[in-house]
Image: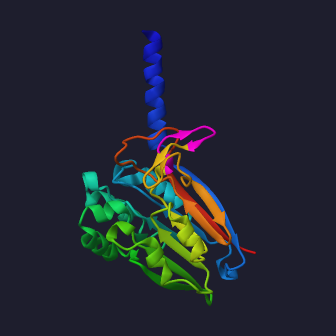
Amino acid sequence: MKKLLMLIVVVITLLYISNSRIQTTEIIVESDKVPMSYDGVKILQISDLHDATFGENQENLVEKIKKTKAELIFITGDLVDSNRYNLDQSLELVRQIIDFAPIYYVTGNHEIATNDTENINNSLTELGVNVLSNEEQIIEHKGEDIRIIGIEDPLNGVLVSEALSQFADNDLFTLVLSHRPETFQDYVENKMDVVFTGHAHGGQFRLPGLGGLVAPGQGFFPTYTAGMYTENSTHMIVSRGLGNSAIPFRIFNSPEIVVVTLKSI
């Protein structure tokens, strides 16, 4: 009986740590296309919140974000969860961090599944968020420009490859927000520089030596679940995300925010 109780305590402790302790993952991206004025710029990525809460009014998550001192914030979809849709709760995080840095956002599949995308986008825009729906923005710093592209989740009916094609063949250093990592080859073929994705939830259960177990769009033992993947000149960042959806818990897969530092070489 004592051994059973100890096992239960261990399992509960593991589940608590794996689902509530936020990890900050730092990644450096080096490229000769990064303008010198952007050398050292930090970009914070938030993905797959799924209406999860971390402390009262998101205070634990907000404190983690504040400590990064990021100059740009990217939200790469599934801020809400279509299975327990609570837009006001999801927007609370944005309200808390909107003054930290410019925020850019793209939809995930859960936003589209709510059939309330227009309201979500309008609500975010009213808070000061740059909502990118298969469009680009050129931003300038100290006289030098880079490009930020936002690709809507393909659940809206437009394939990622189709959405990307209109932005190919541009010499500007390009950052892409796109929810789906399984379309990595589309980013490579269109010569995108750095792509920020989520959706895979880190494989939900991470197995030592094997990685993630299962991910939407990739099935069992998925290829793209966490960290940076590089092919040719394209770097894809995959955030493990913060919340859960159909599978309500994680194992060996803490909630994560990602900080990418740009380096000019």
On screen, residue 249 above or below 10: below
Q: Position of residue 77 (x, y in %)?
A: 40, 63
Q: Residue at x 60, y 41 (%)?
A: 210
Q: What range of the chain is rendered magenta?
A: 202-211
Relative horizontal placement of residue 21, taking residue 152 as reference (left or right): right
- Which of 199 and 187 lies nearest the eye of the viewer? 187
Asked if residue 52 is among those painted magenta in the image, a careful observer would answer no
Q: Residue at x 48, y 78 (%)?
A: 164
Residue 46 point in image, percent of width and height: 47, 61
- Magenta stretch: residue 207 in it? yes
Q: The N terminus lies in which quarter of the figure? A: top left
Residue 146 x %, y %: 58, 83
Q: Residue at x 45, y 72 (%)?
A: 160
Expressed as whole percent of the image width and height from the top left, the position of residue 41 reads 62, 72
Image colouring: rainbow
Task: Tell me if 89 is positioned left or right of 178 in this view.
Answer: left
Q: Is residue 71 visible?
A: no
Q: Nearer the viewer, residue 9 or 50?
A: 50
